[in-house]
Image (cartoon, rainbow, N blue to C red):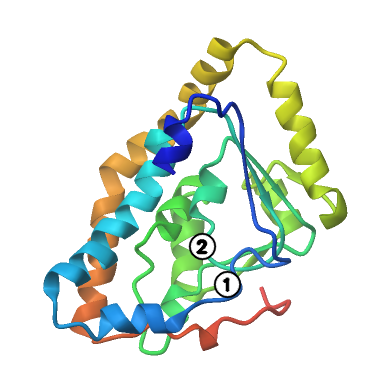
Amino acid sequence: MKFVGHDTQNEVLIFTSTDPYWINKWDTSSFKEVEDSADNDQRYNVQIYDTLKVVENFVNDIEIPTITAISGRGIHWEMALMSDITLCTPDFILKDDHFGMHGGHVPGDGMTMCLQKVLGIKRGNYMALTCKGIDAKTCLELGVVNEIVEREKLLERAWELARDIMKKTRSCRRMTHHICVRPWRAMVERDLRVHVISEMYSFNLSKSAHDFEYIKYDDDK
């Protein structure tokens, strides 16, 4: 992300996925390599440092307006929710499955923090502990997303918004983004490290592993 932010030729970021799902495929062997490692430095670098920097770089290093186009269901919506504008498809379901993993998994790598911010503490905590989902229509009503757009028109709408933003002066665009992202920067600075360390400490105490079989793409809410 910092490379995107440091490239002064970038003006507006459209953040999306080419797959019908937001995140749908994982290389579980890459997780296992770290989880089984006896190298504590490697575990720290990947499980804590890398986890922190993905989110920190998005809010701290991107100096341009951001638009996320959520292309469907999946997991890990942190940066989608932190974007200045968030679009989604009608089949989108906002859900955090961490706590539902076999044996329980602390939802500390950004999702619960974001849910508490956009939904309020009570709703965010409820979603974290029950793994219940919220459909796209409800997300729009609660202010989690800005627009619901049919998948075939999703990117077209994102580009339409980007072109409209580009009509403003460069200084106006960038300084407006600073205002938009400021609440997220304050939250990330204050809370993210505690969330991530809580997750990874519990993860290693219980000798857990990333098991994505528990994630289901159905209409359960």
Q: Considering the image in quadrants, where does the C terminus appear?
A: bottom right
Element under label 1?
A: loop
- Measure how far apart labels 1 and 2 are at the Cα level: 14 Å
Identify the residue at image location x=52%, y=19%: 174
Verify CB contact (< 8 Å) between mark 1 and mark 2: no
Name the residue beneath numbered marker 2: 76
Q: Position of residue 43 (x, y in %)?
A: 21, 71
Compared to residue 155, the image places residue 22 above or below, namely: below
Name the residue beneath numbered marker 1: 132
Which of marks 2 and 1 precedes in the sequence? Answer: 2
Q: Quadrant of residue 166?
A: top right
* Amino acid at the residue labelled 2: His
Compared to residue 29, the image places residue 81 above or below, namely: above
Identify the residue at image location x=47%, y=30%: 7
Q: Is residue 36 left or right of residue 166?
A: left
Q: Position of residue 125 (x, y in %)?
A: 43, 62
Q: Position of residue 45 (x, y in %)?
A: 22, 62
* Amino acid at the residue labelled 1: Lys
Compared to residue 88, the image places residue 42 above or below, namely: below
